[in-house]
Amino acid sequence: MICWVLTIGADFHIVNRMVNYMPVNLDSTFSALSDPTRRAIVQRLAFGRATVKELASPFRISLPAISKHLKILERAGLLTRTKNGRTHHCELNVAPLQEANEWLVWHQQFWEQRFDALEKYLQSSDPSSQKESSS
């Protein structure tokens, strides 16, 4: 496993072990979710299956434009499309969202730990906080 040393301090190293674990689909998930129209579509699909017409109805854009957004979400693995006659139904696939959430939670915990360590360091090196604790 390749690890990247992010910080070198006197007493510790911060190593990024996530470098090799980042799923390839994570980029396409975040890219697909970068557009507000696609996020709104994903939010709507969280409540259940919908037709393309139902998904398009709240937006003031053409059906071909909605179809392009759906293709991007489909390529990212965020939705699956089924055809019943001439009607296309879309369903949310939560697996890529779960992967993105796991990535975000890991980074949130990592940075919270770093900020906690920084706070402790700053408190220990602040002469005024040492005077308060000794009184």
Image (spheres, rainbow, N blue to C red):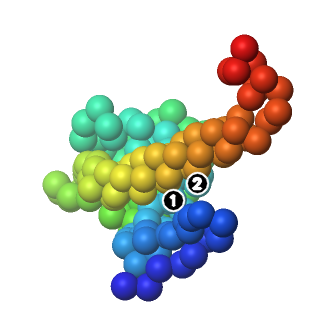
**Residue 133 occupies quadrant:** top right
Q: Quadrant of the C terminus?
A: top right
| x, y percent for residue 5 | 57, 75
The residue pinned by badge 1 equals 30
| x, y percent for residue 12 | 57, 64
Q: Residue furthest right?
A: 128
Residue at 51% across, 70% down: 15
The disc placed on residue 96 is none
Instruction: Decide: few, some or many residues near mark 2? Use Cα within 10 Å; few <14, some 14-19, many ≥20.
Output: few
Asked if one can make out residue 71 in the rendered structure from this viewpoint, the answer is no
Asked if one can make out residue 10 in the rendered structure from this viewpoint, the answer is yes
User: How many numbered marks does the figure carry?
Assistant: 2
The residue pinned by badge 2 equals 34
Q: What is the CA distance from the residue labelled 1 to the residue labelled 2?
A: 6 Å
Residue type pointed to by label 2: Ser
In the displayed structure, would residue 72 be above or below residue 101?
below
**CB-based contact (under 8 Å), mark 1 and mark 2:** yes
Q: Residue furthest bottom?
A: 2
| x, y percent for residue 91 | 26, 49
Q: Secondary structure at mark 2?
A: loop
Q: Quadrant of the N terminus?
A: bottom left
Residue at 33% across, 40% down: 45
- In the picture, measured across the screen, residue 89 lies left or right of residue 103, that is left
